[in-house]
Image (cartoon, rainbow, N blue to C red):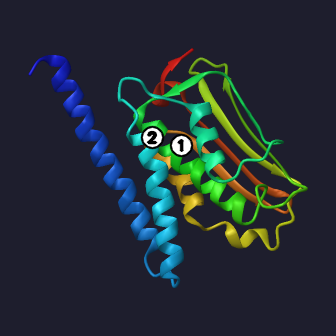
Amino acid sequence: MNAKEFADTAELRHRIRRLLAVFRSISIHMQGQPDAQESAQHLAGRVSAIGRAAIAPIAGGMDLECLVLDELLAHGMRRETVVEGPAVRLNAKAAELMSLVVHELATNAIKFGALSQPQSRLSVLWWFIDAAAPRLHFEWAENGVRMAAPGRYSQGFGSQVVKRLVASELHGDGELLFLEEGVLCRIEFPSDEALLKNE
């Protein structure tokens, strides 16, 4: 085995361990949920979202715009939805995590938010923040949503992914706010932690 093959094998093993850790977090969160059928659907959706990123070649990374659009199209994206940002290719770790983030946001939007109500709007934007250590800022913003008791959604698995996994896996910051007009999610992480290359 040459040096490149050894490095690829080591990366693959690390990737598998990381995926297993994410699946463990998902299973722990889902323990004790009363509706078995709904739990199974949630689990299938989360595994599919991570799987789409996990099958991407390690060396090639995943395009962030494609990642967002694929997930939105799977959940019934509307014509007025805005998806916009510079060309970004995420490394394997970031792609897997962001796939799960976008899946959780889209699932919530189709059940309660901007993908379920005709008067609402959704914008998914990202941009780089110029600094000594560049960071990628990702924002999911819903407007015009009629949400009943928005605070009751704040402790779900999506919140854990945004607040805890973004910090632990990407050394970034995330907030997920359930407002009366819809969900606002902001995520920021260092470019060198998550990007394969910046085109």
Tell me which residue sits at (53%, 82%) in the image.
35
Residue 177 placement, left or right of 1: right
Q: Residue furthest top?
A: 199
Identify the image quadrant of residue 93. top left
Q: Amino acid at mark 2?
A: Ala
Looking at the image, is mark 2 or mark 1 nearer the viewer?
2
Give x and y (percent) for residue 194: 48, 31
The earlier-in-sequence mark between 2 and 1 is: 2
Does residue 102 appear to the left or right of 149 in the view shown? left
* CA distance separating discs 2 and 1: 9 Å
User: Dot 1: what SS?
Assistant: helix
The label shown at residue 98 is 1
Q: What residue sits 39% from the left and 41% below the top?
A: 54
Identity of the residue drawn at 64% across and 39% down: 69
Q: Position of residue 22 (x, y in %)?
A: 39, 54
Q: In which quadrant of the rendered view does residue 7 lie? A: top left
Q: Which residue is mark 2?
A: 53
Badge 1: few (under 14), some or many (20 or more) residues near its Cα, within 10 Å?
many
Residue 87: image x %, image y %? 62, 21
- Above or below residue 29? Residue 35 is below
